[in-house]
């Protein structure tokens, strides 16, 4: 069974209206755009509604700074937050330590916007890297530092679940029902397939945000994910 996380890629008032229409919602994702505009008060408001907040700011900084950000997120009542695995093992270890079991810190492996070629070029490796191997390598590094889990695309879930074992959080965006427009997502999966492959949390934006009846799409996807 996987939890559905609604990605609040909306203005704050639209997000409030959407949540009023989906009383079953348990998790929401607040990303950089909404957080930079609305800040901690909106996160507190969402937590006060009884929602689990996934604060997706993808920290990648020196270990001391990331640890401070994780502590701040925990104090804010956030349930999940992200760091980049490429911040390195010392940074991930400090993030895990700073979480003190109060907030689940998950590591972003390879951004889904990367191709194998530009990822290889970014790392100065030349040629193409095998993204699946890279995701598995970073997931293993995240596990070794004590992070709560990782973020990966639907294509990598099954491999990563094998690397991380049953207890880790495996958070997966790019979720579409068959027939839903993919939008700019290249690597997609249905909620059934992603949950079956081992995802613990599914991040869903546009299929719910743009639906005429968002509650019925949420319920359908949650049921498909086993929730
Ligand atoms: O609208 P859609 O369902 O594609 O939204 C997916 C959400 O997950 C967006 O908030 C997007 O920024 C986020 N995300 C993603 N791919 C990643 C990490 C986060 O699509 N690798």
Image (tube, grey):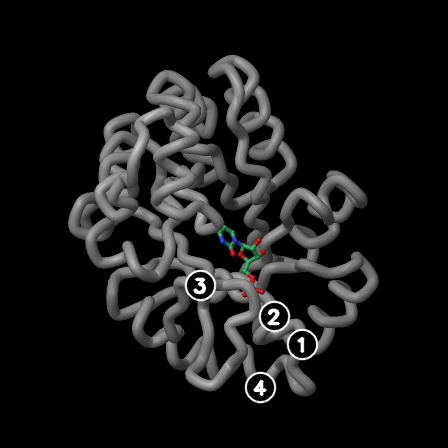
In front: mark 4 or mark 3? 3
At which x and y percent is residue 214?
Answer: 64, 80
- Label 1, on which residue? 210
Ligand 1 within 8 Å of disc 2? The answer is yes
Which mark identifies residue 186?
A: 3
- Label 2, on which residue? 206
Label 2 or label 4, whichever comes before in sequence order:
2
In front: mark 2 or mark 4? 2
At which x and y percent is residue 187?
Answer: 40, 63
177, above or below 123, in the image: below
For image coordinates 29% across by 36% down, the residue present is 127
> Marks 3 and 1, how far apart in space?
19 Å
At which x and y percent is residue 21?
Answer: 70, 77
Image quadrant in which you'd find residue 143: top left
In front: mark 3 or mark 2? 3
Could you say which is closer to the camera, residue 126 or residue 11?
A: 126
């Amino acid at each position: 069974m996987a939890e559905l996380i609604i990605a609040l890629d909306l203005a704050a008032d639209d997000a409030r209206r959407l949540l009023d229409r989906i009383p079953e919602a348990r998790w929401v994702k607040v990303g950089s755009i909404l957080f930079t505009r609305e800040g901690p008060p909106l996160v507190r408001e969402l937590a006060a509604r009884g929602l689990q907040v996934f604060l997706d700011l993808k920290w990648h900084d020196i270990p001391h700074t990331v640890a401070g950000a994780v502590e701040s997120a925990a104090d804010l009542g956030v349930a999940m937050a992200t760091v980049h695995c490429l911040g390195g093992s010392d940074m991930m270890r400090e993030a895990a330590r700073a979480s003190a079991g109060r907030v689940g810190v998950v590591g972003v492996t390879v951004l889904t916007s990367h191709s194998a070629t530009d990822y290889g070029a970014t790392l100065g490796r030349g040629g193409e890297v095998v993204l699946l191997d890279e995701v598995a390598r970073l997931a293993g590094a995240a596990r070794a530092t004590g992070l709560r889990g990782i973020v990966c695309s639907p294509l990598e879930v099954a491999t990563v679940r094998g690397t991380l074992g049953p207890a880790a959080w495996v958070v997966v965006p790019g979720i579409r029902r068959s027939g839903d427009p993919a939008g700019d997502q290249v690597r997609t999966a249905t909620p059934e397939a992603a949950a079956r492959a081992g995802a613990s949390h599914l991040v869903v934006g546009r299929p719910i945000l743009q639906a005429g009846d968002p509650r019925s799409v949420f319920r359908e996807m949650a049921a498909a994910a086993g929730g």
